[in-house]
Image: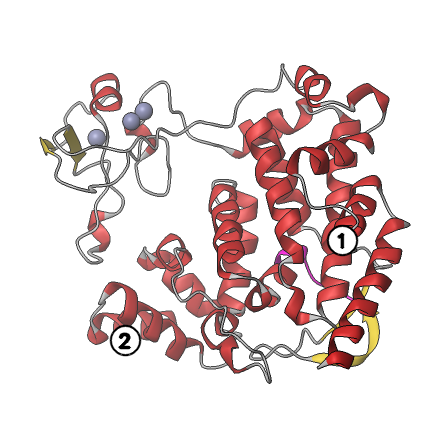
Amino acid sequence: MQSDKTNQETDLQKLSLKLAEQNEFLSYLAKCINFENSFDEEEAINSFLRSFGEEYNTQELLLRKLEHVPTLKRACGRTINKGETLFMCFDCDLVAPQEINGHYALQCKECFMSSNHEGHRITSRISGNNEGTCDCGDPNYWDSKGFCPSHPGITNEFINQTYQKIPELIRKRYVDSLKEIFYFSFDFLQDNPKHGELIDTAIALITRFHHLNDCFKLLTAEVLISKLPESYGLRVNLQNLTNFELTNEVKPCDCTFLELLIRFDFMFPEAVQNSIRSVLIELIVFPDFKDVHFRLYTRLLHFFYYMGTYPDFPTLCLSKTSFFVFQFFSTEKDLLTAVSYAESINFLEVVHLVLKNYFNVSKERFYSISFNGL
Ligand SMILES: [Zn+2]
Ligand SMILES: [Zn+2]
Ligand SMILES: [Zn+2]
């Protein structure tokens, strides 16, 4: 036991030395890992910002430089409480026609009153418990012709315009630092899978920046869908789609940061897994990100459902509840696309299992979808 503990400490010290040579935030993280100080979110953010240079090195300065960047909040998402009136439109609802477990889309009163449903088949009723949130502005659930003027939805054109308005230096520093933080975390975790909590600080930092100004969501998405720079080598075997496997030598890693996040997911404590999913859910509104995530999720489906078999891993951290199943496979079109990617072993079996467990989709319907897809 004693020697185990000593080994772990040496590993942490080695990591700490490696991190200390990188940017300010990573050196701060190094001190926390080495127990020289305890983690303080405010101090972590400030150390991260110091690497942005003098012009931006406090939160106030940073926010002032981003004042002209428009908000990305272009959907309503308001929770409809018990007793409030909710509105449905059979012509704008994109969920109900899929007939999955009785799901449907809706609008809150304010959005419904200011949107145009002329000639549409509409209805309303008093909401019960947990009826959901207003779908106005979300092109996955509600037809854009029925959006209200306050929630025009996110288009690629709007994303590009917003992205152009982020000062180049802020963009570069945030993106580069995040890549470094992720890389050094994965590099350490591949040999120390029991230190999954390490990623927690990175996720906390990301969440905090998303709250400071939502344009950082665009930058986080940019990092996640970009490939690792060639100089970043890892031992993860990317050919293995069913198990987490390491090769003997370090090789340049030809995959996205998002793929690594999925592959390392089973190491993270459940609370961190959930925070990661919340971050990813926020980013799915960006079409490019959704496309990359959808393909990856489909290809690596096995990891989400079977990773519990990793040898000698002490606890089964894998969260079995995944909202992405609904996000990605709720429409027949999406499911057909997923089947056409079928790179994952036993893909149909996994999808079937997922659908059966979470949405009670009948076997007949599932087979008709998958055979059509094949
Ligand atoms: Zn609304
Ligand atoms: Zn609205
Ligand atoms: Zn309508």
Kindly give the residue lying farthest to the right in the view shown.
21
Q: Which residue is mark 1?
A: 35
Looking at the image, do the residues carrying marks 2 and 1 touch, with CB atoms under 8 Å apart? no
Q: Which residue is mark 2?
A: 367
Q: Is the magenta region chiefly helix, strand or loop?
A: loop
User: The N terminus lies in which quarter of the figure?
Assistant: bottom right
Mark 1 CB near ligand 1 (8 Å cut): no
Q: Residues within 10 Å of mark 1 (few under 14, many from 20)?
A: few
The picture places residue 77, in percent across and down from the top left corner, at 34, 33
The picture places residue 240, in percent across and down from the top left corner, at 63, 79
User: The C terminus lies in which quarter of the figure?
Assistant: bottom left
Highlighted range, magenta: 253-258
Toward the viewer: 101 or 247?
Answer: 247
- Element assignment for label 1: loop
Q: Amino acid at mark 2?
A: Tyr
* Ligand 3 placement by image quarter: top left
Q: Is residue 56 left or right of residue 352?
A: right
Labelled disc at residue 352: none
Is residue 276 shown in magenta? no
- Looking at the rendered image, the disc whose residue lies closer to the viewer, 2 or 1, is 1
Q: Amino acid at mark 1?
A: Phe
On the image, which quarter does residue 373 sit in? bottom left
Q: Looking at the image, which residue is at 70% across and 62% down? A: 255
